[in-house]
Image (cartoon, grey):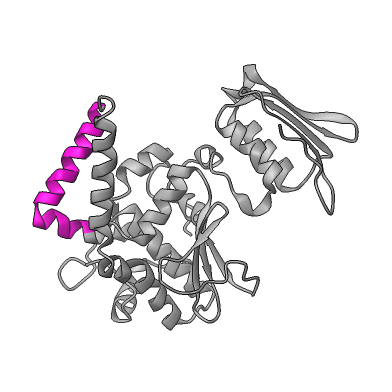
Amino acid sequence: MNEEVPYELITIPEFKEFMYRSLIPISDIFDHNNDPIQKILPFWRRHKILPFKAVGKHWEEDFELTFIQLIWLRIVDSLRQLNYPLIHIKNLCEYFFKDSWDDDLPMKILLRDKFLYENKASKEALNDQEKLILNRINQCLENKDARTMMFYLHNYLSELIAASLNERKDAGILLYPDGQIIEYVGNKYFNHKDQKINYANSAPHIQLSINYFLQEFIDNDQLQKIVVPKIINDDERTVLEALRDKNIEELIIKKDGETILRIDSSMSSSITGEKAIQLRKILGLRNYEEIEISTRDEKTLKFKKKTKSIISNYK
């Protein structure tokens, strides 16, 4: 990933608002060797791992990418670094994009969102933004060209990214040597194909974290709000979720008999990015002996770090 991006980092709400818009000039993007990514695109296109159209016959300098399209290019470039077989990259492309066409996913998304907004409207008044979104949905359903455009913008990859942002949980892809593909959001593992999946598969595999690719777009303080479940247990995850939801009455973390971090209700609503990073580091490295937390909804949790099991009391 190129460390110096040609645009300012944004917030999660801003990313969600603009994620489907063509905004990033292809000429500004470089691969892991710091070469213009345009050089490799014709090769990827010939091998059918470029699921969106160029301008005319060439990738002209003024061609603009959406955030989702750029994330796909980053995924392919990362797999290229890892010498992942081209045939499996093609299968991954078909999994996320061709299957979206075959399954009529964009239409399902439109109908799903139309139902959600109309159902909400039947119970309470929609705000101006919600009215605008519902109006756009109805326009897409009525306009064939707009529906066709949806097929280029909405796919299983964009749904995975949206799920990560909406649920504020890390999401990603697990790729196995035999070509098996598993998606995850938080602790939920799934595959949209009709096939038997071993979700507890501990065989060697490649893990692609959506959170990693979002670092190119979203400010780090914002990404700290996304819970990464791979490195924490259920009790530690409860602490982070309470912090994220501003549901902390009091939090005390101890090591060597001393309090190393304390957060109370007066701080939890305005916790700084630095303190949030400190908390995540403590939990990720298991650099504590005991944690005690009480939440605003009158729940308590107290546990100690243990090698085999964690003793907790969650009422």
Q: Taking the image as drawn, is residue 195 in sight?
A: yes
In terms of secondary structure, what is the magenta stretch mainly?
Answer: helix
Q: Is residue 136 magenta?
A: yes
Tell whether 201 sits left or right of 303: left
Q: Residue at x 57, y 70 (%)?
A: 206
Q: What percent of the width, then of the height, locates residue 36?
A: 37, 66
Residue at the right extreme of this rendering: 257
Which quadrant would residue 218 be assigned to in this image?
top left
- Image quarter of residue 66: bottom left
Q: Is residue 297 above or below residue 113?
A: above
**Residue 41 in picture, x, y percent from top left:** 32, 72
122 inside magenta stretch? no
- Label tally: 0
Give the answer, above or below, for where 61 lies relative to 161: below
The residue that appears at 29% across and 57% down in the rendered structure is 154
Nearer-the-camera pick, 106 or 299: 299
Q: Is residue 85 above or below residue 253?
A: below
Could you tell me which quadrant the C terminus lies in?
A: top right
Up the image or down, 198 lies above or below 280; here it is below
Residue drawn at 23 percent across, 37 percent down: 118
Magenta part of the protein: which range?
A: 127-150
State the image coordinates of residue 13 (x, y, percent, origin top left): 38, 37
Give the residue drawn at x 64%, y 25%.
248
